Structures are given as C-alpha cells and as structure tokens.
Amino acid sequence: MKKGIIIKLIGGIYTVLDGDNQRHTLKPRGIFRHKNKSPKVGDIVDFDETTITHIHPRNNDLVRPPIVNVDQAILINSTLRPNFSLFLLDRFLVLSHQEEITPVIVINKIDLLGKVAFDKLKSELAYYEQYYDVYYLSAKQPQTLEAFKQTFDGKVSVFAGQTGSGKSSLLNAIDPSLDLKTGETSKALGRGRHTTRHTELLTISSGLIADTPGFSKLDFNAMEAEDLTHYYIDFFERSQDCKFRGCQHINEPSCAIKKAVENGDIPQSRYDNYQKIHKEITNQKKYY
Ligand SMILES: Nc1nc2c(ncn2[C@@H]2O[C@H](COP(=O)(O)OP(=O)(O)OP(=O)(O)O)[C@@H](O)[C@H]2O)c(=O)[nH]1
Ligand SMILES: [Mg+2]
Ligand SMILES: [Zn+2]
C-alpha cells in the first residue's frame, strides 16, 4: 500500500504523485462512485498497483477550481492591463477566508508602472501588509521573483485573479519547463483572453500549484452578513471595541470600525468595499 496526492484527473484516470516524486496512473475503486464520493485533485490517497483504495479526510473542498486540501490562495493582481482594483482584492480576500484558505497577495506587472505610480500603489497596500504577505512582481523581471518562489514550498496553492493578470506568465517565469500557454492582452479592451484550461496540480519549487483560468465575475457562496464580519479579519480584530456585540459596522452607533475609518486607521476604500459586499449579501438573501 502506497500513499500520495492526486495531481491530475482526465477522463476518469487519476495521476498520483507519491512521496518519492514518482507518478502513478490509477483508477478509483468502484465503491467511491457508488457512494458518490469520487476522489478529487488534491486528495491524499492510498493506492495499490492499479487502484486508489482509500481517500484521506479533506481539509477543504473548493468548487472552483475543483480542488481539495488547498493550503493557500495566491491572489494575482496586475498593476495595469487589467487595472488594479482594491475592490477585487477585497472580494478575493473575503472569498479566501470564507473557504478557510490563507491568502497571499501578489501585485504583478510592476514593470508597467513608473516610480510615482508604483509608490502610490505601495502606500495603498501598506495597510494590507499588516495582515497579509504582499509581493511585488514582474513576470518580465526574474530578479523580482526570488523571494516569492519559496511561498510554494510544502504547500498546495491555487492562483486566483482576473484573466490577463499574468498567472501563467509568472509560473513560466519561475519554471520555464512548465511551458504554460499565455495570452496577449487585448489592447483595445484591456482584458486578456481565456487561455488556461483543465485543473491540474503542477510541481513548482517544492510545492504544488493549480494555475486556474481567470474570471471576470466572482460570486459569493451563500453567506450571512454576520459571516462577513469574520472574513474582514482586520475589522474582526477591532470589533470587540464596538458597543454592540455582533455589530455589523453599518448603522450601529459607537462602532469602532467607523471610528477607525474616520481616524484614518482603516482606509476609506476598505470600508466602502465592505459596505458594498455587505449590501450584496443582504440583497441576495431576499431571493432565498
Ligand atoms: N508587462 C508585463 N506583462 C505581463 C506580465 N505578466 C504577464 N504579462 C502579459 O499579460 C498577458 C496575460 O498573461 P497570462 O499569463 O496569460 O495571464 P493569466 O492570468 O494566466 O490569464 P488567464 O489564463 O486568461 O486567466 C500576456 O500577454 C503576458 O505576456 C508582467 O509582469 N509584465
Ligand atoms: Mg493563464
Ligand atoms: Zn462596529
């Protein structure tokens, strides 16, 4: 009996990577399908010569991309083409916390910014650096990637970010043998084409990464407005100073979050985005 991790699934055939970095092509036991518990990419499994015999318990189970046991979400934002958006970043952070996956923030395409614009972006992100790892990278400048390479080690990561933000380009820059397809950004639209296809974990540095295609629309799974107060981890940390327990920082009096925004301790944009997401969630609920 051997143990490994599923890194690929195509047409019912699984590829499993064992602890000695050997790959095995396997089929699942029939009982899995029967019990409606098919193995997924990211599953830790036991197997014999031909067959996956046992699936170990999962830490988490992502719908998109369909991968389980994800340790971290690496959020790829580009400076330009497509334009950087604090709203998208705040959304991605909420989604990561909802899935209980540690987010890492990447700003890619720093080569496209002049010094003044770059300094401005960095100062906007300084707040986030208190809570998250933030990397400033360029797929076109390999020297910017040195420290970042280590974030993959010993982990299962997923890339998330808008189409054209440079996810595949970054992976190629770190390991050219991956030879992933990348799309030229459409200059007219400022958007990239959809270029990444199926779900697979790739080996990179000493870790595994799923290069997922970007998307233009991001929906939240069913979420209560209350949950949002947890997924904004910086707000949650301060919320013990709100007058009301369970304060949602919207209309309540003596709210520590609103005070911190007024004092400039929390960026206005971070709060505005919170309000927008809060509204979206409460509006969604009407339809249930
Ligand atoms: N100037 C510059 N261009 C970059 C950088 N990284 C990627 N690009 C370009 O941006 C375009 C999109 O890059 P991709 O790597 O295909 O983007 P992606 O995030 O994988 O896109 P999807 O697979 O569609 O989600 C390509 O034309 C790249 O050459 C960068 O750091 N600097
Ligand atoms: Mg891609
Ligand atoms: Zn509050």
Image (tube, helix red, strand yellow):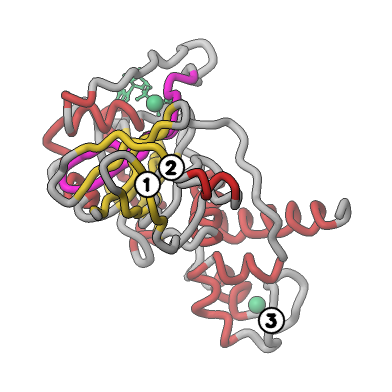
64 left or right of 288 in image:
left
Residue on which the image places disc 1: 52
Residue on which the image places disc 2: 28
Q: Are marks 3 and 1 in contact (CB under 8 Å)?
A: no
61 left or right of 204 in image:
right
Crowding at label 3, few (<14), some or many (≥20) Cα neighbours within 10 Å?
A: few
| Mark found first going from the N terminus, 2 or 1 | 2
Residue closest to the eye, 152 or 12: 12
| CA distance separating discs 3 and 1 | 46 Å
Q: Are marks 2 and 1 in contact (CB under 8 Å)?
A: yes
**Mark toward the viewer: 3 or 2:** 2
Q: From the image, which quarter does the C terminus lie in?
A: bottom right
Is the CB of the residue bearing disc 2 within 8 angstroms of ligand 2? no
Q: Regarding mark 3 in the picture, which secondary structure is present there?
A: loop
**Mark toward the viewer: 3 or 1:** 1
Residue 84 vs 233, above or below: the answer is above
Residue on which the image places disc 3: 246
Residue 203 colored in magenta in the image = yes
| Mark found first going from the N terminus, 3 or 1 | 1
At 50% from the left edge and 69% from the top edge, which residue is drawn? 233
| Mark found first going from the N terminus, 3 or 2 | 2
Kind of residue at disc 2: Pro
Crowding at label 2, few (<14), some or many (≥20) Cα neighbours within 10 Å?
A: some
Q: Regarding mark 1 in the picture, which secondary structure is present there?
A: strand
Residue closest to the eye, 183 or 143: 183
Kind of residue at disc 1: Ile
Image coordinates for residue 209, horizontal then vertical, percent? 31, 42
Residue 49 colored in magenta in the image = no
Residue closest to the eye, 42 or 194: 42
Kind of residue at disc 3: Gly
At 51% from the left edge and 11% from the top edge, which residue is drawn? 188
At 26% from the left edge and 29% from the top edge, which residue is drawn? 111
